[in-house]
Amino acid sequence: MQDRRVTPEDATISAELYQKGTTQLETEIRILEVWLAELNETSRDNPFSLAARKSYGDMLQSRKDLLKSLQKHRQSAT
């Protein structure tokens, strides 16, 4: 069986896909930032708020990392 996986060096992203991915990540980042700001206005001792803050904070960091990685990949490809 032939290995059809693309190595990072061979990966290319079309301009359209890059734009869609960037737009999606930026939208998700803005939404998560709003949610976190709203959660910061809630009681600090509420276990559900604490869990949500942790979860949304992790998601936000993940989206930011993905966006940064996508931008780096795009820059190195041009």
Image (tube, rainbow, N blue to C red):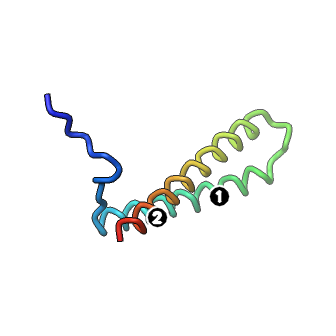
Residue 5: image location, x then y, percent: 25, 40
Which mark identifies residue 33? 1
Residue positioned 80% across, 53% down in the render: 41
Please indicate whether residue 28 sits to the left or right of residue 8 in the image: right
The vertical placement of 5 against 17, above or below, is above
Q: Which amino acid does label 1 sit on?
A: Glu
Mark 2 touches mark 1? (CB < 8 Å): no
Q: Which of 62 and 77 is in front in this view?
A: 77
How many residues crowd mark 1 within 10 Å: few (<14), some (14–19), many (20+)? some
Determine the CA span between mark 2 and mark 1. Answer: 20 Å
- Where is residue 73 shown, x and y percent of the image? 41, 60
- Viewed as shown, does residue 21 lie left or right of 15? right
Location of the C terminus (image quadrant) = bottom left
Mark 2 neighbour density, 10 Å: few (under 14) some (14–19) many (20 or more): some
37, above or below 15, in the image: above
Residue at image mark 2: 71
